[in-house]
Image: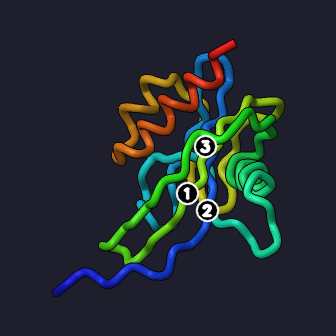
Amino acid sequence: MTNPRPTAPVPAVGVVCVQGDRVLMIRRGTPPRIGQWSLPGGRIEPGEKAVEAALRELREETGVSAQILGLIDVVDGIFADEGRHYVLIDYVARWIAGEPVAGDDAVEAVFMPVEEALAFVSWDETRRIITAGVGMATTP
């Protein structure tokens, strides 16, 4: 059996939310990458600006509020085994308020030390984005 052809690209956002020396991570409850640790994020809704989507998804998935510090990168997430293609717009943010509580597509939400987060993540691109985001958040 061959892998399904990916769908048309879907615009989505991700957030590297930093609190001191920790980063906010979620365990995914829905595809793609169900059950894996990842960054909070999701699809951009029609008429929604990307940065607004990032803050909304962060609140919906974790209950956390943050201030966007900047754009990290834009990544193609092509998950051929699931027939999905996302264009991921990744932001770095600084935590403002709220304790992580899993919601929406997440089954777990927690701040964890950066090294632990990097060890839990299975996708190289997510590790690269976390490293870049933490570097941006800690640069004066």
Residue under label 3, please give it: 109
Q: Residue at x 48, y 29 (%)?
A: 131
Residue under label 1, please give it: 88
Where 12 sits versus 115, above or below?
A: below
Relative to residue 18, is residue 112 drawn left or right? left
Nearer to us of marks 2 and 3 is 2
Residue reaching furthest top?
A: 140
Circles 2 and 3, Cβ within 8 Å, touching? The answer is no
Q: Earlier in the sequence, mark 2 or mark 3?
A: 2
Relative to residue 72, is residue 59 drawn left or right? right
Residue under label 2, please give it: 12
Circles 2 and 1, Cβ within 8 Å, touching? The answer is yes
Nearest the viewer among 76 and 81 is 76
From mark 2 to mark 3, how far is it between C-alphas? 19 Å
Coordinates of residue 18 in the picture (x, y in percent):
65, 28
Nearest the viewer among 20 and 110 is 20
Query: Residue flagged by tag 1: what amino acid is it?
Result: Leu
Coordinates of residue 83 in the picture (x, y in percent):
38, 78
Q: Earlier in the sequence, mark 3 or mark 1?
A: 1
Nearer to us of marks 3 and 1 is 1
From mark 2 to mark 1, how far is it between C-alphas? 5 Å
Residue reaching furthest bottom?
A: 1
Coordinates of residue 44 in the picture (x, y in percent):
70, 66
Q: What element does badge 3 sit on?
A: strand
Where 108 sits versus 97, above or below?
A: below
Query: Residue flagged by tag 3: what amino acid is it?
Result: Ala
Q: What element does badge 1 sit on?
A: strand
